[in-house]
Image (cartoon, grey):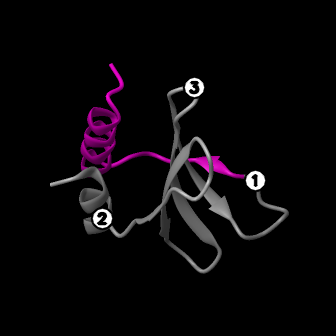
Amino acid sequence: MSAKEMFEELGFTFDDSLENEINYFNKRFISDTNVINFDLKFRRISAFIESDSPFTPNIPYTLSLKEIQAINKQIEELGWK
């Protein structure tokens, strides 16, 4: 199973439309979306809750074991060592 398939099973949507980034989005509440971002240029990963409200900052969120497994699979597919 690919990382994309693992994330999709968890309810995430794949987006690679930005240069040097892969993003997975999971709409959790009316205005909140969980985001897992892979920065391809600097090989960094961010996990945060993005709000539609301009008055609410993005905040980090705790990953589940299945999300960590999907992240590890994505790292493997990217060839990051």
Q: From what the image shows, is residue 21 above or below residue 72?
A: below
Provide residue 44's location: percent of width, then percent of height: 52, 30
Indicate the amino acid at tag 3. Phe
Residue furthest toward the right? 55
Q: Point out the tag, 1 or 2, that comes first from the N-terminus.
A: 2
Q: Earlier in the sequence, mark 2 or mark 3?
A: 2
Is residue 63 in the magenta section? yes
User: Which residue appears at 69% of the width and 52% of the height?
Assistant: 58
Tell me which numbered mark, 3 or 1, is placed earlier along the sequence.
3
From the image, tell me which residue sits under label 3.
Answer: 42
Residue 74 located left or right of residue 54: left
Q: Is residue 32 left or right of residue 53?
A: left
Question: Which residue lies under the disc numbered 1?
Answer: 57
How far is disc 2 from disc 3 in space, using C-alphas?
A: 26 Å
Provide the secondary structure element on which disc 2 rests: loop
User: Badge 2 is on which residue?
Assistant: 10
User: What percent of the width, then of the height, locates residue 62?
Assistant: 44, 45
| Residue for point 84% across, 65% down | 54
Do callouts 1 and 2 mark residues in contact (Cβ within 8 Å)? Answer: no
Region rendered in magenta? 58-81
Q: CA distance from mark 1 to mark 2?
A: 24 Å
Q: Secondary structure at mark 1?
A: loop
Amino acid beneath label 2:
Leu
